[in-house]
Amino acid sequence: MQPTIILHTGVGTTPLTDKQKAKKLADLAIEAIDAGYQALESNVDRPALKAVEKTINVLEASGIVNAGVGAVKQSDGIQRRDATIMDGSTLACGAVSSLENVKHTISVARRLMEFTELPGDESKDPKWNFYFCGYYVDKIFEIHGEKVPDEWKMSGKPSMVPRVSDGDTVGAVAIDTRGTIVAGTSTGGLSGSYPGRIGDSPVIGAGTYASCHCGVSNTGRGENVMKLVAAKRVCDLVKLEKINVMIAVDRMIKEYEQTFPNTSGRIGTIAIDKDGNWTAQFNGAAMTWAVKSKGHGFYGQRRDEKIEF
């Protein structure tokens, strides 16, 4: 299988007419996809997992997307972050919500996923829980004799970190030479929302899903994405109807628009299927995406745009 990785930096409601902002997002996307692809080709255990984590780490550290350093603030002025990561070969996953002082939220989710993979009795052992919220993330690390690494945390008070509003929720999907598919998504949520509001990004099957057939990361109006269980819908179409991921995503977006005709219809999706087919589709005004496989790299920001880099 040809190793491939794809990312998005969120779907927007307005066109990227500001050339400086558009270039900033494009440059960031290329930097992140290069870092992820390097991990994908490296001799590491679980390269697809590492590639997705590394790609999103670069985006989270940038400060110009709605994740990590650049997370938006909820109505009380605090940044809270959500993330999830899923390994399609085992359905192992880790998800976190409302983290206030964490920069690399996706890395916390990945480590939480690894905790759940340890042997144990699912009916009795607390380490089988894969979704944690806020303060309790620190507690689950302590249970395993660890702490959240300092390099994953923010420096300074979270509410004092400046936000440059150029991008939105971020995500990545990768497939490695063994055919293992991994998907991940990281977000700062919805600006001005009530404290504790959680969208689709950390919800397995909604914002993120991976199986042996397909991997998906979504961006858009979280409440609607959750109602449609949009990420798993794509994977189910690929599996049950034996169609490629390009057709499956197109169908899911049309279903989304039909289901929510009079509300926010914005959604963006990146996906890779078991045959290595990939797609980046959206119905908003703009979505920066990038993809890389051996010898080829492309990015786009407008619909039907595909630029080689």
Image: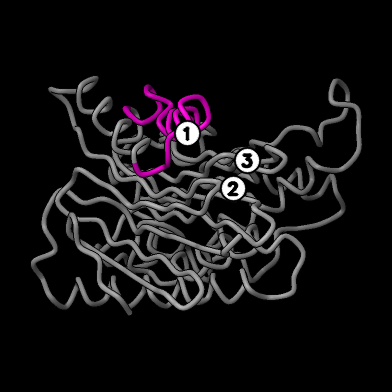
- Residue appearing at x 70%, y 49% in the figure: 138
Residue 1 % position (x, y):
61, 60
Residue 259 vertical placement versus 170 (above, below): above
Image quarter of residue 190: top left
Residue position for label 2: 85
Q: Is residue 226 magenta?
A: yes
> Which of label 2 and label 1 is nearer to you?
1
- Residue appearing at x 42%, y 57% in the figure: 67
> Which of label 2 and label 3 is nearer to you?
3
Q: Residues within 10 Å of mark 2 (few under 14, many from 20)?
A: many
Three-letter residue code for mark 3 = Cys
Image quarter of residue 125: top right
Q: Return the disc, 2 or 3, that comes first in the chain's sequence.
A: 2
Image quarter of residue 92: top right
- Residue projecting furthest to the right: 120
In magenta, the rendered stretch is 224-246
Residue 202 % position (x, y):
51, 40
Question: Disc number at residue 238?
Answer: 1
Residue position for label 3: 212
| Marks 2 and 1 close (CB-CB < 8 Å) | no
Q: Is residue 251 magenta?
A: no
Question: Could you give the CA–CA distance between mark 1 and mark 3, rounded to whole angstroms?
Answer: 10 Å
Helix, strand or loop at mark 3: loop
Question: Could you give the CA–CA distance between mark 2 and mark 3, rounded to whole angstroms?
Answer: 15 Å
